[in-house]
Image (cartoon, grey):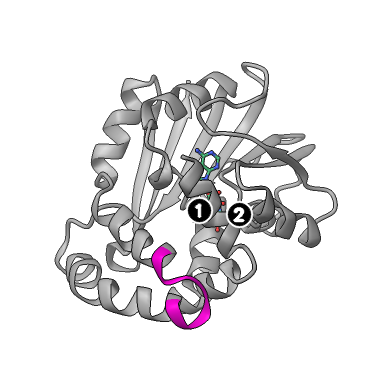
Amino acid sequence: MAQIREMFDQIHKRYDLLNHLMSAGRDIAWRKTCCKKLPQKENAVVLDLCGGTGDFSLAYKKIGGEPKLSIAGDFAGKMLGVAAQKDANLKLVQMDAIKIPLASNSVDIVLNGFGMRNIPYLDLAFNEIFRVLKPGGYFATLDFFKPEKTIPKLFYHKIAPLAIPFVGMIFSKRNAYRYLVLSILNFLTAKEYATKAKKAGFTLRCINALDFGLAHIVLLEKK
Ligand SMILES: C[S@@+](CC[C@H](N)C(=O)[O-])C[C@H]1O[C@@H](n2cnc3c(N)ncnc32)[C@H](O)[C@@H]1O
C-alpha cells in the first residue's frame, strides 16, 4: 500500500498531462458521461474517493451538480495538493479507502475514478463505501477493467504494454506506467467487480462500456 501511495506522490506533477495524453483526452469525456448518469440530488454530500488531482469532483460540478459539500479523499497527499490548486472549495481529506474517516450514512454520492483497481483489499473498500453512503446513495466507478472483448483485449495485451510505459518514460516515471498496465490486466472484469459489490450489499444499476470497452462505468446503489 505504501508503495502505491509513494508512486502516486512521485507522479503527481504530470499525472493530469499523462492522463489526457494516453487517453487522447477521452478521460475528460468519460468522467462527464459518468457524472451525467447519476441522479441529481440537492444539497448532496459527494465523496470523490481516490480523488487524486480532483478531476472527478470538478466534472461533477461542471455538469451542474451543486454539492453542499464536495470531499476529495486520497492517501497520496501530493495528488491532493494538485486538487487544492484547482478548487478552493474542495474539502481535501487524506484517507485510506479501506478506512474512510466519515460517519456512517453521511454521503449521498461516492465517485471513484481509476482508483479501485489500486486497492488490494477491495472487499474492505466496498464495505466502507457502503457504510458511509446514505440509503438511496449512489456509488459510481469509472475504471479500466480486465478486458473481455476483442478490441480492448488487443489494446491492453499488445499495444498498451509497449506504448504506455514508453510515454511514461518520456514524460514521467516508466515504472508507474508499467504498473498501470499490469494493474488493468490483473484486475476484475466489470461484471466480476459488480458481483463483488453486490456481495457487499449494493444493487447494480448499470454497467456501461465506453469507447469499445476500453473503460467502463459501474453504477451501484445502496438501497
Ligand atoms: C489513477 S489515480 C485516479 C485519480 C482521479 N480519481 C482521476 O480520476 O484521475 C488513483 C488514485 O487513487 C489513490 N489511491 C490508490 N489506493 C488508494 C487507497 N487505498 N486509499 C486512498 N487512495 C488511494 C492514489 O493515490 C491516486 O491518487
Identify which amino acid the numbered label 2 is placed on.
Phe
Q: Mark 1 or mark 2: which is in front?
A: 2
Magenta residues (range): 169-175
Q: Which residue is mark 1?
A: 34
- Mark 2 element type: helix
Nearer to me, 67 or 155: 155
Taken as a whole, is the magenta stretch helix, strand or loop?
Answer: helix
Q: Position of residue 158 (x, y in %)?
A: 18, 74
Furthest residue to the top?
104
Coordinates of residue 68 in the picture (x, y in percent): 79, 37
Residue drawn at the location 65% of the way across and 28% of the way down: 107
Which disc, if any, is residue 44?
none
Along the viewing direction, whichever of 70 and 122 lies nearer the viewer: 122
Q: Which residue is mark 2?
A: 56
Q: Residue at x 50, y 28 (%)?
A: 98
Nearer-the-camera pick, 199 or 128 = 128
Report the number of numbered marks. 2
> CB at mark 1 closer than 8 A to ligand 1?
no
- Check contact, mark 1 vs mark 2: CB within 8 A: yes
Ligand 1 within 8 Å, label 2 CB: yes
In the visual, does 87 lie left or right of 200?
right
Residue 223 % position (x, y): 48, 20
Q: Is residue 170 magenta?
A: yes
Label 2 environment density (alpha carbons within 10 Å; few <14, some 14–19, many ≥20): many
- Gap in angstroms between the C-alphas marked 1 and 2: 9 Å
- Asked if 139 appears above or below 176 in the picture, the reply is above
Q: Secondary structure at mark 1?
A: helix
Residue drawn where x is 50% and y is 36% of the image = 139
